[in-house]
Amino acid sequence: MSGAFEKVYQESINDKEGFWKKAADAVHWFKKPDTILDTSNSPFNRWFVDGEINASYNALDVHVDAGRGDQAAIIYDSPVTDTKQTITYSELLDRVSRFAGALQERGVSKGDRVVIYMPMIPEAAVAMLACARIGAIHSVVFGGFASNELAVRINDAKPKLILTASCGIEVKRVIEYKPLLDEAIELAEHKPDATVVFQRPQATAELQEGRDFDWKTVEDNAQAVAAVPVKSTDPLYILYTSGTTGQPKGVVRDTGGSVVSLKWTMKNIYDTEPGEVFWAASDVGWVVGHSYIIYGPLFSGNTTVIYEGKPVGTPDPGAFWRMISEYNINTLFTAPTAFRAIKKEDPDATYLAKYDLSCLRTLYLAGERCDPDTLYWAQDKLGVPVIDHWWQTETGWSIAANCKGIELLPVVAGSPTRPAPGYDIQVLSEDGEQMEAGDIGALTVKLPLPPGTFIDLWNASDRYVSSYFSKFEGYYETGDAGYIDENGYIFVMARTDDIINVAGHRLSTGGMEEVVAEHPDVAECAVMGVADKLKGQIPMGLIVLSDTCTRDEDEVIKEVVKLVREKIGPVAAFKNALVVKRLPKTRSGKILRGTMRAIADSAEWKLPATIDDPEILDEITEALKAAGYAQD
Ligand code: COA
Ligand code: AMP
C-alpha cells in the first residue's frame, strides 16, 4: 500500500472545502462559486451555493467545444430488438438541444417537473439531458412499476409534461407503456398538460388529440436551445425510492454537487479516462442509471452504453462478454445478481472462451451485499479486480469503495472496502455511542454529507429530517447496519428497516403489506424478504385470513399475488405467500418480522423477550418448513 488513498481520504475529511473546491475547478461553471460550503441550516447543507452551472452543458457542450464531437457519447445495443447504434457527442448535443427547445415550446421552463417513463433507449438520455439543459427537473420512473406507482409519483412531482415510449421489451414480451401511462394519468389527481410519446416499431401507441404528441415530429420541428445557467443548488432531478411505507421518498439531487462529485468519481473511484468505454448495466430508472449510465460518464467524456437486454436469455449467458469485447469496454458496473444469473446458467463460464475480454480492466458491483462466492467466481473467470462498493439512492455515489483511481487497496470479500473520500463513516450504538472495531451498529455518516448527495425530499422536508437526521444528531442515518474492522474496512450486513433488495432493486415490504391488506379476505399480513440464491432476497407474504373467508386458500393467494403485480408492478417479484393462523407479535402488538425472516432463512435467532405468545412461532416454523423454508 502506497498510502495514497489514506492521504486523499484525510484531506477530504480535514479540509472539506479545499478538497471539493479543487474538484469543482475541474468542471465548467457559468459563475464559479465563492462559497464552497454553507452549513448554516444543517442538515440542509449546501455546496457551491453561489455558483451557476448547467449539467447538460457539462455533459455535452464542453466535449464538443474541446474537439471531441466525433467521439461516441452513447453506444446503444438492444439484443431484444436486434438494434445497434452509435451516437457521437455532436449528434447527441444536436438532439438534446432540439428536444430541449421542444420542451420549451410546450411551456416547460426552469423548475418545472417532467416525468420520464421510458425503456432503455437513447431517447431516455435525450429526455433527461434536455430537461437539464433548460433547468427543468426530471423524475424518471422505472418501467417495471405499475400504473398505480406511476400515479403516486405524478401526484407528488406534479409534472407539466410526461415523456414516454410506445413500449418496452422484456426479453420477448412487448410491454405497451402508453396504456399504463393513460391509466396512471386517469388515477392521478394531478394531470399533466401533455405527453410526448416515442413510437417504436414493436408497438404503436394511440395518441389522444390535443394531449399526446409524437416525439419524432416534436423533435424534428423544434429549434435548438442553449444551456440555461442554473444555481448550483437548483434540483437536477427527483428520483423516487422505497421508504418504509407505500409513499415513496422523492430524493432531490442538486445540480452543482452532482456535476462536481460524479466527474470526480469517474477518475478517482472508477479509474477511467475520457474516451474510454464505461458500461453500467443497470436501468435509467435507478440511481445507478442516473449517475453512471447518463451523468458521470458524460461529464467525464467517456463513451457510455445503453443496453436493452439481460445478462442471460438475450440470447445466452455470454451476452455481457459479447458486449465487452464488441465495444472495447474497459469498466463494467452491475449488480451481483447479474453475475449470479450468469453463473447459474454457465457455471464454468464456457461462453467466455468465445470472446476476447483483454480490454476489461475492472468490474464494479453494487446494489446489494456481494456474496463472497459471486466475487470469487467473477475474479477467477475474468481475471480483473472485482470491486464491491456500497451505495444508496440517497447518496448518488458510493459511500464506501476501493478507489482504484487513487490506489487499489487489497480486496476483502464481503466488504466494500473503506469509506469513500468525503464520507466520515461512524458506527453508532442505539444510544449514539461509537462502537468498537468489529462491533455491529448503525452505519452513519457525520455531517456534512459530501456534494452530490441528496439535499432534500421533494415536498417532504420534515420527512427528510425525521427519517435520516433525527435519531443521531449531527449524523446521516443510512438505514444499514454493519461494522468497521480494525483495518478500517466496512462490512454492510443488513437494513435496519423494512426495505429489501430484490435482484438489486430496492423495494418496501411495508408498501407491499399495504397492498396485500387491501384484499377483502385478508385480516392481517406481514411481508418479509427471504434469502434467494439468484435475486439475493425475494418478498414472501404471511397472511391471516379473515374469519368470514370461506374461499380456498390458494385462490386468495393467487389474487393477492395478482394484486401486488397490478398495484406495484412486476418488479416487486411478489410470488410467494403462505396462509397462517396467527402472526407472532410483541406484547405491544409489533409483528416480529425479523424473527420470522431468520426462521425462514434457517439463520440463528433468539426468542424475543417481548414476545406475546411464543407458541405462534412454532406454528410459523411448521408452515415455513412445509413450504420448503426453515430447513435445519
Ligand atoms: N419494464 C417492465 N417489466 C420489467 C422491467 C421493465 N423495465 N424490468 C423488469 N421487469 C419485470 C421482469 O420482466 C420480471 O417479470 P416477470 O415476473 O413476468 O418475470 C419482473 O419485472 C422482475 O424483474 P427482475 O427481478 O429484474 O427479474 P428477471 O427475472 O427479469 O431478471 C436478473 C433477473 C437478475 C437477470 C435481472 O434482475 C438483472 O439483470 N439484474 C441486475 C442488474 C440491475 O438491473 N440492477 C439494478 C441496480 S444496479
Ligand atoms: P438503492 O437505494 O436502491 O441503491 O439501495 C440502497 C441499499 O442497497 C443500501 O442501503 C444497502 O442496503 C444496499 N446496498 C447497496 N450496495 C450495497 C453493497 N455494496 N453492499 C451491501 N449492501 C448494499
Image (cartoon, rainbow, N blue to C red):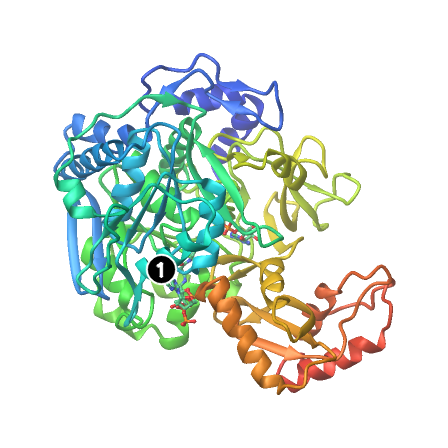
Label 1: which secondary element: loop
Horizontal and vertical percent for residue 229?
32, 21
Q: Residue at x 49, y 35 (%)?
A: 5
Q: Which quadrant of the rendered structure holds the C terminus? A: bottom right
Is residue 1 in sight in this rendering? yes
Question: Circle 1 sits on which residue?
Answer: 383
User: Is 347 placed above or below 252 here?
Assistant: below
Q: Residues within 10 Å of mark 1 (few under 14, many from 20)?
A: some
* Amino acid, disc 1: Gly
433 or 99, nearer to the observer: 99
Residue 465's image quarter? top right
Horizontal and vertical percent for residue 207?
24, 54
Q: Residue at x 45, y 55 (%)?
A: 187
Is residue 602 in sight in this rendering? no
Query: In this rendering, would 253 be left or right of 349?
Result: right
Horizontal and vertical percent for residue 450?
52, 31
User: Is 152 placed above or below 340 here?
Assistant: above
